[in-house]
Each structure stands twice: as C-alpha cells, then as structure tokens.
Image (tube, rainbow, N blue to C red):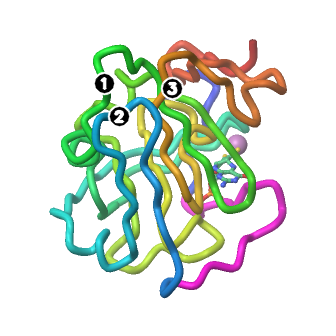
Amino acid sequence: LPPGQREVCDWPVLDLGAQPKIKLETWQLVIDGAVATPASLSWNDVLAQPQSAVISDIHCVTSWSRFDNHWEGVSARHILGLVHPIADARYVVFHSFDGYTTNLPLAAFDDDDVLLAHSWEGKPLNAAHGGPLRAVVPKRYFWKSAKWISRIEFSITDRPGFWEVRGYHNEADPWTEERYS
Ligand SMILES: Nc1nc2c(c(=O)[nH]1)N[C@H]1C(S)=C(S)[C@@H](COP(=O)(O)O)O[C@H]1N2
Ligand SMILES: [Mo]
C-alpha cells in the first residue's frame, strides 16, 4: 500500500457528476495529434485489435486503494504501434465524453501495464466506471485513468488536464505522494 492509502473492497464511483450517454453503434475513439498515422476506431475496430489482460491496483488520491483488479482491453503499446507518434511527441492527453481531460508523459503511457479497458473482472465495464472504454494507468493516481474516453491526443508540449489545472499534481505518482502541487 502506498503511503497515506487504505485498502477498500468495494469500488467507489468518482467523477464530475454527469455520466455521458454513449451508444456503441455511433461510438468512436479518435487518436490524433503528434502522430504519423492518426486513427479513428469504431467499437468493432476496438474489439478487432489484439486483446490484453492486466491485473493492477487502483490508488485514488482521496486515499482509497483497491488491489488486484482484472482488466481486459487494448494495450497502450498496441495503440502506439497503430499511430506511430512522431519523434518530438512527449505527452498524451485523454479526452472524455463528459468533457474531462487528463495528461500524461508519453513515457508513462508507453508502459506494459497501461490499458484501454472495456472489461473488469470478466464483465463489460459498466457506465458508472467509464464503460464502454476507459484508460487504466496503474502507476499513477486514478484521476489519470480517464473514464469514457473519446480521444487520445499526442502532443509535443504538455497540456495539463481538468484536475491538473485545479491544483492536482502533474505527475501523480502514489509512491511519492504526488497528490497536489
Ligand atoms: N471522464 C472522466 N474520467 C475520470 C473522472 C471524471 O470525472 N471524468 N474522474 C477521475 C477521478 S478523480 C477518479 S478517482 C477516477 C474514478 O474512477 P471510478 O469512478 O471508476 O472509481 O476516475 C477518473 N477519471
Ligand atoms: Mo479522484
């Protein structure tokens, strides 16, 4: 358990309070910005990509942690192979259907445990927890794991997201308690 955290066995729901209504038939994930080959994936396209399974822990900045979550989805590394970030790309911004954004260094996105997840514990991820597709970035506090993702934007410059411009730490490493800046 990282410092200042306690384990929970349930899974709290935290967001801005407006759950977007999403239809799978019209759902799209745009991947663009500082990449050589931008992509736009339909839901069927997502399911047609190689699928990965990851078991990881959740650490929320509000001090709860949840161990051993079984996720399934498309790995960040596979996405990098699809769109080929240009040499100067250094950052990633997740955009979500509720207007939420959060930023990551490209080096943090490019990790073997980072997933675009559509399933949790063997079942489709429910809407409250970010279904149909959310980011899961286990080595950062959970606000970096955007729910309901609509766009992954690669960037040469850093662009702090919703909570990062409101005083949350830009890096968000739970092991060194990078909670607020
Ligand atoms: N789209 C979106 N993603 C989001 C948020 C949000 O408000 N909107 N909140 C973040 C925060 S602060 C947390 S702690 C986690 C909560 O995820 P959960 O509700 O599945 O526990 O989602 C993160 N991702
Ligand atoms: Mo949070």
Can you identify the residue that label 1 sits on?
Answer: 86
Residue at point 29% right, 52% down? 55
Query: Label 1's element?
Result: loop
Give the mark nearer the N terminus: 3 vs 2.
3
Residue at point 19% right, 42% down? 81
On screen, residue 90 above or below 25: above
Query: Label 2's element?
Result: loop
Q: CA distance from mark 1 to mark 3?
A: 35 Å
Can you identify the residue that label 2 sits on?
Answer: 35
Is 53 on the left or on the right of 146, as rendered? left
Where is residue 62 shown, x and y percent of the image?
A: 73, 38
Q: CA distance from mark 1 to mark 2?
A: 5 Å
Does the magenta segment cover residue 8?
A: no
Residue at point 22% right, 59% down? 53
- Magenta-drawn stretch, dominant element (helix, strand or loop): loop
Can you identify the residue that label 3 sits on?
Answer: 2
What is the quadrant of residue 34 in the picture? top left
Report the span colored magenta: 9-23
Q: Is mark 2 within 8 Å of ligand 1?
A: no
Say which amino acid is labelled 1: Ile
Q: Quadrant of the C terminus?
A: top right
Say which amino acid is labelled 2: Val
